Amino acid sequence: MSGVWVVLEERNGRIARMSWEALAAGHTLGAQSSLSVNAVVAGAQTDSLAGEIATKAVARIVRLEHPLLAVYTSDAFTLALEQFIRAEQPDFVVFPHTYQVRDYAPSLAARFGQVLIGDVTGIGAGPVLHPTDKDPSVGTPVFVRQLMQGRLNGEYSHSGNGTCFVSVQSGAFRADQAESAPASIEIFTPKIEQAQIRTKPGQPFRGSAQTVDLGSAQFIVSVGRGIKEADNLPIVQELATALGAELAASRPICDNGWLPIERQVGSSGQTVSPKLYLAVGISGAIQHLVGMKGSQCVVAINKDSDAPIFEIADYGIVGDLFEVVPALTEAVKSAKH
Amino acid sequence: MISSLPTLSEPQHFLFQEKLLFVVLAAGSGLLFWRRFSPILTKILASKRDADFRLFPLGRRVWDFFLEVVCQAKVIRQRPLPGLAHAFVFWGFCAFALVTLNHCAVGLGIGFLDPSGWFGRFYFYFAAAFAVACAAGILGLFVRRFLVRPRWLGDKLSWESGFIALLIFLLMATYLAAFFVADTSATARLLWWAHTITLLVFLPIIPHTKHLHLVLSPATVFLSRGSFSHIPPLAGDEDFGLVAGTDLTRLVSLQAYSCVECGRCTEHCPAANTGKLLNPKEIILGLRSYLNECGPASAEPLLGKYNSQEAAFECTTCGACEFQCPVGIEHLPILIGLRRGAVNTGAWEDDYGAKLFLALERGSNALGMSATERDKFIQKQELPYFDGSQEFCLWLGCMGGYDPKGREIVADFVRVMKYLGTSYGVLRKEKCTGDPVRRLGNDLVYQQLAEANLETMAQAKVKKVVSICPHCVRTIQEDWKEYGTPPAIEHHSEFLARHLSQLPTVQSQEKIVYHDPCYLGRYRDVYEEPRAVVSHAGQLVEAPRSHERSFCCGAGGGLAFLGEEKGERVSHVRAAELVETGAGIIGTACPFCNTMFRDALASKGNGAPQLLDIAQLTARALPASAAPTTK
Amino acid sequence: MKIVVAIKQVPERDAQVHIHSTSNWIEEEDMQWALNESDAYALEEALQLKEKHGGEVVVVSAGPERVGSTIREALAKGADRAIHIDCDDLNQRDALGVARLLSEAIRAETPDLTLTGLQSDDLGYGQTGVILAELLGLPHASLILHVEKTEAGLTVKRELEEGWFQTIELPVPAVLTIQSGGNKLRYATLMGIKKAKTKEIRRVTSQDIGKVAPPVVVLERISVPQKQKSTQILGGSPKEAATALVEKLKFEARIL
């Protein structure tokens, strides 16, 4: 067995942030079990990525290189990592829980008779609290992941021998950590043939950009009656632009013709589920709430502290939107630099 | 002295040829009538039996018949002038039954009413009085239909109606003229023939015109289901509502043929008045065309060529049409029946509708909110759970449990109950009563919701329920009966009205205009209780359309969940009407009305009146120490 | 096209969840159950493919007796027949164990296409479909929003992160995991429920399928997360509140 191996992922020519978080998780495991922490990166050309990793605290870096790894396919990635893992026999393989990992890591683990412990939010030290266990194995890590869509936490243990496969949730581990001495960089060339790759991936593309598509927007800034006049809309538009967000509105705004009807969120308009829903001057009538209740994070800015929107908001600022919104626009702008 | 008055002339000594001609003509006229009428009767009788039809008890039927047919109560009450004109035509016809019988007998030389005898003298004068009223009435109706032309009668001028009016006028005129001629005069004979021919022409016209209601509507009124918006249970595994001709029941077919096209339903319909496709009169006439062209055995869909699906789903189920109809047509079972046919077979495709159905298939409320939101509200308000020891189970409903405005109403109603020392508790879990899916025709989801709730209530041993929502009240009390025995329930207006003497009053001259919710007024016949509550809190002002003629807010029938409406918004029209009264406060008694008006008033800016539920109006007068109101 | 859809019964979205006294599962008594959401989308995709190209839709579900109601719901929405794998210990099996059960039932059907939802709403492993492909030796694609049948096989639309998508071509037979929201779901109808009564539900026991391997990954304990969602009101001057908000969004909510 050869310690903890973290599989890092490339995004736009660089190692993505989530991969650094996976590395941090790897360090947690390494520290608990006194194992070395190593990194592996797959692709057709991985030299610069390996260089990037070399600045971090890892014992060994392996470049899993093959021309057929240039574009991600589950077949090629599974094959390459399978061969690498058979050769290295790691104790733990740690992934960032990305869409790509979700696509191949379960197959990969299954090839070893293993099961990926996916979307982990925390790693604790054993022993696992098991009422029937008379002789709890000390030192077995406990993996925490969410159940019932976040309503419960589950604690998992890996039983038996063999490699333990883990993927960690975005943001669960802090990526910023100490730099370290340069590690050794090796190249591993898997055997992959074109015929083994059964799927043909196309180029990534964006969702239709022409029409307003609030349904798939990641960030939405929504404005309500608190804006008072159509002439005041630009201050909210500026905030939306700073955030890279779509502008939306409650029904009275669209009824007045201040914004087009396709930007209306609510029971008679669009149903949205963005990562961030920033409600500006919206009191939160039920017709509006039903359209945005699926949002991941809700921020409300309203001068009425009793406004129902605060009931469902994660963060709230009670204040005059004409003061708060420009201040927020500035804060967002400076945070982005 | 009486004997000095002219008597009705009765021509004597008809020639044999004349008698023969009369018999032949009468037989021809009768035959023609039958040839036209029997297919209609056959179609009605060939329609499916109404599964839940019970003739008994007769008392209710006889009383309805007496009021609506004999007294013409509905006709007069809802449209006094034309109603009275119609009543006189109707009473004239009744009075004329004996006269006409005698008239025919005279033609055969066996007249049995002696015009100079005391009874004949009395009766002919009695009939003459009606003849004058009837002639005046028909003239008035003619003027209205052809010169005044109210818009709900449609754009098309009906010449046939004009012709019929002429015939009725002629019948009366020829009768009255006969008082002024001698028995033996040629004029008397001429008048007799004119009267006879008018009668014989009139008879066969009846079945093919709206005057069929002369024959059918007494039966329609007598046989009607009786209770308002009674949705019949589905009968057997093949019944999905009104899908095709084979689903039309005898009552539906009878009602389709009874329509007199008076347009009262259209006049009061919120959809027809705001530029939507739906026109309840056309729905009924569409069914009639279907019966005429396809018949009750046809598999041709009812929604399609003859009636539009879009129109059927524009109905707010406010029930103004059914309430107004003078000939006993029950529009709601028909409209909801058409929706059931479309939804139960999956023929209705609508994004908003599907979203609502899926939310209620999987979740607990029509708003698609998580049930934990309701729990949070209960905790925040510190509402006690119902444990069987309290007097009332307080039913929150979707609006009371999830809607911020509905929650305010609940919070204030709870303050009032606390003040009165009434014990209450809420259920740990509640599902939507099924009102929106019931009215949209989704029997599957409705049944699931009703059964689940009935079980919850039975387990909690609930005896008495009070709710702030008329839709919940109606559905629990009436519609749930199909699947069990619902507990007794009352609307909070009834509760508040009963306790008014124990509640403090504000000395306020503030004008409050009260809006009758459809599901409280027409559906439950509760008009005065909420008014008493409003009067307790300020000065009650009536809207131009109020009580049983109240105009819908646009939310009912599941429409609150179906997205943007075509044409003008019903809520805006009604809100404008309420604002127009100049009242500073709009008093509501239904959280759906409240939410619709909130939206409509939002566009009115700062000058808009305040919008308060009757519970809020009552709570305002409570001493501040009686627990603060929380939002 | 013969399509198998693997579906799962999960606690209803609104159901109140209580932890069982064994502390490694939830109290199932009085629980209300529903079809897993992304499985509903998988079923919808299958039904639409069948409506377009003909063929048969077979649903497969593993679980105890109660799963029957969810199977009937799927039949009511238009699936042609069903296989119910009787199994009382579903939640104690790991993803591989569940995929093994399903794969044996599906293998015998030799479908052109196997669909599953992306992830279950209860355990949320999100692996069953991918492992199924591995066990059946078939190509797969995950997070699929749309499926198009072509001459050569399939063209599918896959969701990537941050609003990006990708088209993937793959041969049949294949396994796809379906993301929620790609189609509009149909609602269940009374007529569908009545028709479903006459459709075949074949029951097999997990023993029939054989091979009960002990789980590799064990769910030891479940607990209620300490922090419940509540609103944080950010005070101070507008500038201070704005700065605090950006900090929170960046480091606490981690969405900026």
Image (cartoon, coloured by chain):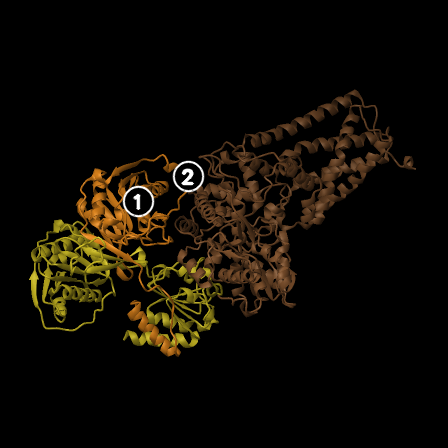
| Front position in the image: A177 or C114 | A177
Q: Quadrant of the N terminus of chain B?
A: top right
Question: Which amino acid does the dot numbered 1 rest on?
Answer: Ala
- Residue at the disc numbered 1: C46
> Within 10 Å of the Cα at label 2, are there few (<14), some (14-19), or many (20+) other Cα atoms?
many
Expressed as whole percent of the image width and height from the top left, the position of residue C102 reads 23, 43
* Marks 2 and 1 close (CB-CB < 8 Å): no
Q: Earlier in the sequence, mark 2 or mark 1?
A: 1
Helix, strand or loop at label 1? It is: helix
Task: Report whether mark 2 lies on the same chain as mark 1.
Answer: yes
**Residue B582 shows in this picture:** no
User: What number is the disc on residue C191?
Assistant: 2
Give the colour of chain C.
Answer: orange
Give the colour of chain A.
Answer: yellow
Give the chain coloured brown. B
> Quadrant of residue B577 in the image?
bottom right
